[in-house]
Amino acid sequence: MSEILPALTAISPAVLPLIGVFIGAWLTSRATLRSSRNALTGIRLQMTLQAEIKLSDFRQAWINILRDCLAELQSIGMTPGKEAQKEQRFYELGTKVELLINNKDEDYEPLQKIMYRLLFSETIEDKYRCNAEFVEVGQRILKREWEVLKVSLRAAAVQTP
């Protein structure tokens, strides 16, 4: 036993710094790993936010196109007379509106009926009777889609750290 003690005493000054180096390296690698995980989480959140913003941009563009089509359709529909060129444009816009709106939307069928009533109205008085209802249904659709857009943007904002 007495021979081991001097041997350990001679080795310990060389071993202790090595042990310290190993412990330091281990702690550093754990901190680096934790930092990398945090960075990855941040990147994933940023990518999710960017995707939500892009989808929101597409939805906003879609809302703008729908609004423009509804406005032009209403304008042509309110014009007295049925010139072939106007009727063709009316049908083009009507079809575009039907394609832009989900046919499961609660206002899809009412809007469709109003568009045809507007098209086949013979007198300006009949057209005016359709006008208020057309605008009201169009506003409901646009408002609902605007609310979906806002919810989507808020959800994306909440995910951001």
Image (tube, rainbow, N blue to C red):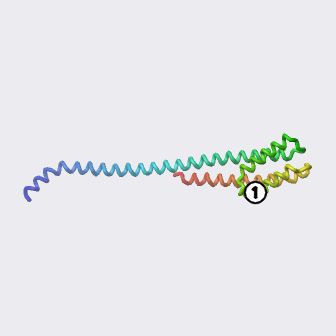
Q: x, y percentage for residue 102?
A: 70, 54
Please tell me which residue lies in front, 51 or 8.
51
Please tell me which residue lies in front, 31 or 108.
108
Please tell me which residue lies in front, 102 or 159.
102
Q: Residue at x 40, y 52 (%)?
A: 34
Q: x, y percentage for residue 138?
A: 77, 52
Q: Residue at x 77, y 57 (%)?
A: 109
Q: Residues within 10 Å of mark 1 (few under 14, many from 20)?
A: some
Q: x, y percentage for residue 75?
A: 83, 45
Screen quadrant of the N terminus: bottom left
Circle 1: element type: loop
Q: Residue at x 78, y 44 (%)?
A: 92
Tell me the residue that label 1 is attached to. 107
Q: Is residue 112 left or right of residue 54?
A: right
Q: x, y percentage for residue 153?
A: 61, 51
Q: How many marks?
A: 1
Residue furthest out toward the left: 2
Q: Is residue 117 left or right of residue 66?
A: right
Residue furthest out toward the top: 85
Q: Residue at x 90, y 44 (%)?
A: 81
Q: Amino acid at mark 1?
A: Asp
